[in-house]
Amino acid sequence: MTRRLALAVLLTLTLCGAVASAVAQQSLFPNTKKNGRATVEFRNDGFKVVANYDYSQRNHDTPWLLIDIAAASERRFTLHKKQITLVTPAGTVLPVAPQEALIADAAGITSLMQNSKIWRRPLAEYFSQRSRIEPLRFYAFPFGGVAFDEAVVDNDRVALGELFFRTLEEKWKEGTYRLVVDHEKAKAALPISLQ
């Protein structure tokens, strides 16, 4: 009988902990929901953002972090690269990596892109306008065109692309980071949990 009681208490505590964690997550990141292990969706006031970081969630022992992002909005606006940041658990705000940083570590980026290929998810499927894509061309890879610091976000197509962040340390620490979009017409904060 005591073994059953102990098991029931343990199960209750585990369930309470999971509920408390979900409530805390919702209060820190309102208007978000998780879709699997490393895909998170934000939706508020006609603005929707989906981020996926399946590879980087478990593989963050390099200076680079890869987050795929897709966005659409009922109000048309131009999203600039500088309006997207990643906030560390310690509160440090990191900008999206500049094109020059990728060029300077071409070997590291090439390795990241090759290793992450099978982990990446098609994010356009989360949007009704999935047949029309506005590429986020924040980066230009060899023979891949021209890089731009901005992209149009509207309700007619999905703005879709990758974001790279670089830490000054050798690797990324475990914890919950905050991916922030801060535009006057659209604001979002999505949890990025590295394990």
Image (cartoon, rainbow, N blue to C red):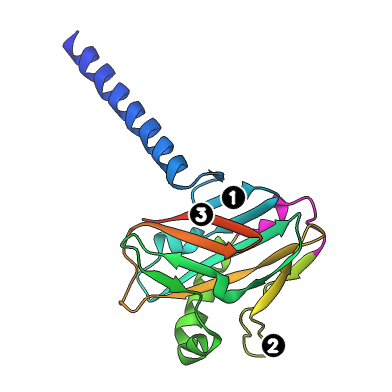
* CB contact under 8 Å: marks 1 and 3: yes
- The part of the chain drawn in magenta is 121-132
Instruction: State which quadrant residue 113 falls in.
Output: bottom right
Whether 143 is drawn above or below 60: the answer is below
Q: Residue at x 32, y 32 (%)?
A: 17
Q: Earlier in the sequence, mark 1 or mark 3?
A: 1
Q: Residue 45, percent across and down?
A: 67, 48
- As shown in the figure, which amino acid type bears the numbered disc 3? Leu
| Residue at which label 1 appears | 42
Q: Residue 73, percent across and down?
A: 72, 56
| Residue at which label 2 appears | 146
Tell me the quarter of the image containing the N terminus. Answer: top left
Q: Secondary structure at mark 1?
A: strand
Q: Is residue 178 magenta?
A: no
- As shown in the figure, which amino acid type bears the numbered disc 2? Val
- As shown in the figure, which amino acid type bears the numbered disc 1? Phe
Q: Residue 182, percent across and down?
A: 56, 64
Q: Residues within 10 Å of mark 3 (few under 14, many from 20)?
A: many
Q: Residue at x 40, y 65 (%)?
A: 59
Q: Secondary structure at mark 2?
A: loop
Q: Residues within 10 Å of mark 2 (few under 14, many from 20)?
A: few
Residue nearest the viewer, comparing 44 with 55: 44
Disc 1 versus disc 2: nearer the observer: 1
Residue nearest the viewer, comparing 135 with 106: 135
Q: Earlier in the sequence, mark 1 or mark 2?
A: 1
Give the left or right position of residue 68, taking residue 155 as reference.
Answer: left
Instruction: State which quadrant residue 178 falls in.
Output: bottom left
Residue 190's disc is: 3
